């Protein structure tokens, strides 16, 4: 007996019931991966800056020995740097899981309830209708209606928030390390603060550079090849 095909289609292609179930299972696994990555991110964002703040308050003064402060400061800096590298790697999986989940929503014909990224008669879903981030959701000359800037200066984006938090954390550990130098006050504190701000600024700059590099790798730019071949989901041409 010929297997009955489902109503889930993309373009002129139809899917069997078995294929449709496979798509749903794929979607469930993809969204589970997204939730796991988001959960790891939020836990790290709660842990890292809190630990750094406590360490600075306890080690930056003369309450503990300079050797102890130096050892703990170096250890904290290395551990935080490792977490930063882990976060940057997870960001790629985070972005790709969003793109994949949105594409699957289109194939599964999920209902749409907003006009974000397409007309109301197009397939939708949590990821398909997600407010624009770094991806090219708008054409040339079009403005993102949900673009926000904190105090009219800082663009509201996940990656910028991550950069600020981890930049401040690495800067805090740097302050502890430099503050053990045998220098007179207030020169010692001013030097420690200056180098800490420098490290924080370099960290924020590197986050933004890698964010741009990740964008170009996923969506292409100029003569650079794009690797996310299903990113047309944001145009909803299904």
Image: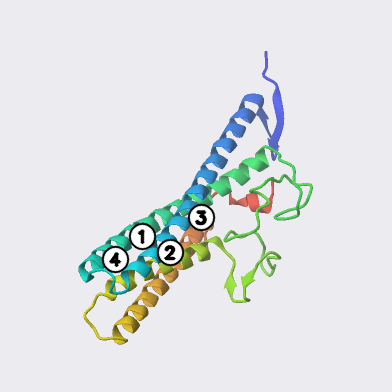
Do callouts 4 and 1 mark residues in contact (Cβ within 8 Å)? no
Give the x, y percent position of residue 105. Answer: 65, 42
Q: Earlier in the sequence, mark 2 or mark 4?
A: 4
Q: Residues within 10 Å of mark 4 (few under 14, many from 20)?
A: many
Mark 4 highlights which residue?
73
Do callouts 3 and 2 mark residues in contact (Cβ within 8 Å)? no
Q: Nearer the viewer, mark 3 or mark 2?
A: 2
Examine the rendering and report whether any part of residue 223 can be seen: no
Do callouts 1 and 2 mark residues in contact (Cβ within 8 Å)? yes
Mark 2 highlights which residue?
166
SS at badge 1: helix
Query: Which residue appears at 63% of the width and 59% of the height?
Result: 132
Q: Earlier in the sequence, mark 4 or mark 1?
A: 4
Spatial CA distance of label 3 from label 2 is 24 Å
Do callouts 2 and 4 mark residues in contact (Cβ within 8 Å)? no
Mark 1 highlights which residue?
80
User: Residue lying farthest top?
Assistant: 1
Spatial CA distance of label 4 from label 1 is 10 Å
Q: Earlier in the sequence, mark 3 or mark 4?
A: 4
Q: Which mark, residue 218?
A: 3
- The one nearer the camera, 74 or 160, is 74
Give the x, y percent position of residue 74. Answer: 27, 64
SS at badge 4: helix
């Amino acid at each position: 007996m010929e297997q009955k095909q489902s109503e889930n289609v993309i373009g002129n292609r139809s899917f069997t019931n078995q294929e449709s179930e496979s798509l749903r299972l794929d979607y469930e696994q993809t969204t589970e991966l997204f939730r796991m990555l988001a959960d790891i991110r939020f836990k790290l964002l709660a842990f890292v800056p809190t630990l750094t703040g406590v360490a600075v308050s306890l080690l930056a003064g003369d309450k503990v020995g300079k050797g102890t402060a130096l050892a703990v400061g170096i250890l904290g800096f290395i551990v935080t740097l490792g977490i930063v590298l882990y976060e940057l790697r997870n960001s790629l999986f985070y972005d790709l899981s969003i793109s994949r989940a949105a594409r699957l929503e289109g194939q599964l014909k999920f209902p749409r309830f907003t006009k974000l990224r397409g007309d109301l008669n197009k397939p939708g879903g949590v990821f398909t209708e997600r407010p624009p981030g770094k991806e090219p959701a708008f054409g040339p000359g079009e403005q993102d209606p949900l673009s926000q800037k904190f105090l009219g200066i800082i663009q509201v984006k996940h990656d910028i928030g991550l950069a600020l938090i981890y930049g401040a954390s690495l800067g805090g550990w740097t302050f502890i390390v430099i503050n053990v130098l045998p220098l007179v006050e207030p020169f010692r504190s001013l030097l420690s603060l200056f180098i800490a701000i420098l490290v924080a600024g370099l960290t924020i700059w590197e986050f933004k550079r890698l964010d741009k590099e990740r964008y170009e790798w996923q969506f292409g730019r100029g003569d650079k090849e794009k690797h996310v071949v299903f990113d047309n989901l944001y145009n909803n041409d299904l």
